[in-house]
Amino acid sequence: MTEHDFSPKPYTNSIEKGKVTWESPSNIALVKYWGKKKDQIPENPSISFTLNECKTITTLTFTKKESNKDFSFEVYLDGNKKDDFKPKIQTFFERIESYLPFLRDYHFKIETKNTFPHSSGIASSASGMSALALCLMSIEKELSVRSSAVETSFNENLFNQKASFLARLGSGSACRSIEGDLIVWGKTDSIEGSTDLFGVKYPYKVHQNFKNYQDTILLVDKGEKQVSSTVGHNLMHNHPYAQNRFQQAHNNLEKLKPILESGDLNAFVKLVESEALTLHAMMMTSMPYFILMKPNTLEIINKIWRFRQDSGLHISFTLDAGANVHVLYPENEATQILEFIKSELVAYCQNGHYICDQIGFGANQIKE
Ligand code: DP6
């Protein structure tokens, strides 16, 4: 497939106005996307667990307008106008307009809210951009579908692929939020069907150990991101370790296959933690350099390691581009591990805040 496959056929319907709502989850990468080329093409493949509880809910109201000269939209977060979100959405519309030719024909009211606090340090770009991409896809579907016969040809697979393709143009990791539960993005030889253009469902056998995998997110630092992800990705240009890192991501995806198939939790723990620390090592060794972990991030990591050694349980951590810690563990060890988290780790969270999440299965349309 190429990007040309996402240019639509001429629309057969005309619609004056309407309203669609989608809820779309966040995701947590096991093998990290860090570094991108032009047009949001990743430098390396990544794989993530889709989350279940951390979601964005977006309602898009659209009304036909007189002139189709400019984009016209307004954005609200929790009912409050958010003009500071507009530049990102403007860029998104510019990137996707050749794939959604109706964009200039309507005025859009974008109303969005998150199930997690906005100032939690949890990136809302993956859930937010995927929710918006799905709303736009629902409009395209309405413009394209004339009869139930055509409806079946506008198949779900293509709908999800294009939604993921569009979401990627908004924020790379957003393309991994349309479906669940394990999503691969980025072409790599060891995963059949993988592509740089959109996220695909992990196509191989996954052991029972990884079903309903738990992710408790410890909110160590709820401040605004110190480095935007776009700035962060750009730091991989001319980075002294970049080529090795990109190759390592391919290798780690290949290594993950037998781990996921056999349910080898010890090997999983090692690979996932190494990925998280490598991501931060890349930031620490770029120019300019950054340390996004906080003292409490390290306290938590050390406690996790000690507890794992003492208990023999399969608790592990991963990190995003920030100080918060995602504590990962299998469902059948949840009681003991959650007990440990509450008694030993929550003290390191800002205001004691944490979020209990687990693997999820992707976005849902909310019908009125
Ligand atoms: C560290 O998807 O936020 O979370 O494409 O610039 O929007 P943009 O970046 P973004 O980067 C996420 C990076 C990461 C790792 C990951 O999710 O794979």
Image (cartoon, rainbow, N blue to C red):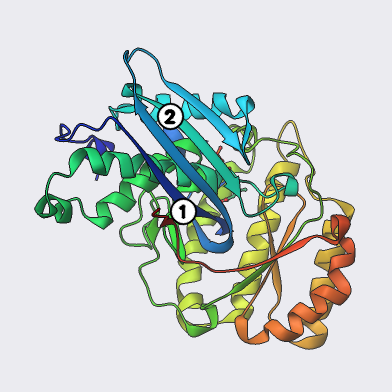
- Residue at point 14%, 53% (across, down): 153
- Mark 2 CB near ligand 1 (8 Å cut): no
Question: Does residue 109 sit above or below 171 in this rendering?
Answer: above
Mark 2 surroundings within 10 Å by alpha-carbon count, few (fewer than 14), some (14 through 19), many (20 or more): many
Quadrant observed for ligand 1 in the rendered image: top right
Dot 1: what SS? helix
Horizontal arrangement in the rendering, residue 7 relative to residue 202 (left or right): left
Residue 108 bears which disc, if any?
2
- Mark 1 CB near ligand 1 (8 Å cut): yes
Residue 90 bears which disc, if any?
none
Answer with mark 1 or mark 2, whichever residue precedes in sequence: 2
Horizontal arrangement in the rendering, residue 45 relative to residue 220 (left or right): left
Q: CA distance from mark 1 to mark 2?
A: 25 Å
Which amino acid, mark 1? Arg
Mark 1 surroundings within 10 Å by alpha-carbon count, few (fewer than 14), some (14 through 19), many (20 or more): many
Query: Which residue lies under the disc numbered 1?
Result: 176
**Residue 196 appears in the figure:** no
Which amino acid, mark 2? Phe
Horizontal arrangement in the rendering, residue 343 relative to residue 234 (left or right): right
> Which residue occupies the foreground of this view, 256 or 16?
16
- Residue at point 50%, 61% (across, down): 251
**Residue 64 appears in the figure:** yes
Q: Quadrant of residue 288?
A: top right
Q: Residue furthest front?
A: 368
- Residue at point 39%, 54% (across, down): 367
